[in-house]
């Protein structure tokens, strides 16, 4: 499998992650506006969610590409 294919898989995964994360945050803030007191608490919560989501996406991407490489030889 070529390097371009793996790069494309990671790029598509990253775009999917960003769209999914945006929609989840939009729904969360729409339903929980009373928990956000100031800009600092908002920034902390967004940063924490971004770090947790990034670790999950990278781990899943590595597992997916490893399984793809294993199955295709």
Image: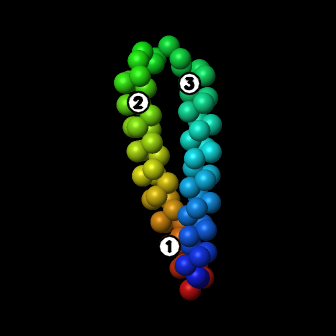
Q: Earlier in the sequence, mark 2 or mark 1?
A: 2
Between the C-alphas of marks 2 and 3, the distance is 13 Å
- Residue 32 horizontal/vertical position (percent): 54, 19
- Answer with left or right where residue 18 lies relative to residue 36: right
Q: From the viewer's perspective, tell me whether residue 15 is left or right of residue 57.
A: right
**Could you say which disc has been placed on residue 2 in the image?**
none
* N-term mark: 3 or 1: 3
Q: Residues within 10 Å of mark 2 (few under 14, many from 20)?
A: few
User: Which residue occupies the foreground of this view, 71 or 16?
Assistant: 16
The kind of secondary structure element at disc 1 is helix
Q: Which mark is residue 29?
A: 3
In three-dimensional space, the C-alpha distance between marks 3 and 1, rounded to whole angstroms, equals: 36 Å
Disc number for residue 66: 1
Whether 19 is drawn above or below 24: the answer is: below
Residue at the image point whose x is 61% and y is 29% from the top: 27
Residue 5 position by quadrant: bottom right
Secondary-structure class at tag 3: helix
In this rendering, the label closer to the viewer, 2 or 1: 2
Residue shown at 37%/31% (left/top)? 44
Cα gap from disc 2 to disc 1, whole angstroms:
34 Å
**Residue 59's x, y, as percent?**
45, 59
Q: Position of residue 45 (x, y in %)?
A: 41, 31
- Residue holding disc 2: 43
């Amino acid at each position: 499998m070529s390097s371009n294919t793996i790069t494309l898989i990671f790029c598509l995964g990253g775009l999917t992650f960003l769209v999914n994360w945006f929609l989840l945050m939009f729904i969360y803030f729409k339903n929980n506006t009373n928990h956000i007191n100031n800009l600092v608490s908002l920034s902390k919560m967004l940063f924490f969610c971004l770090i947790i989501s990034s670790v999950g996406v990278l781990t899943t991407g590595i597992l997916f590409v490893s399984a793809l490489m294993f199955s295709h030889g």
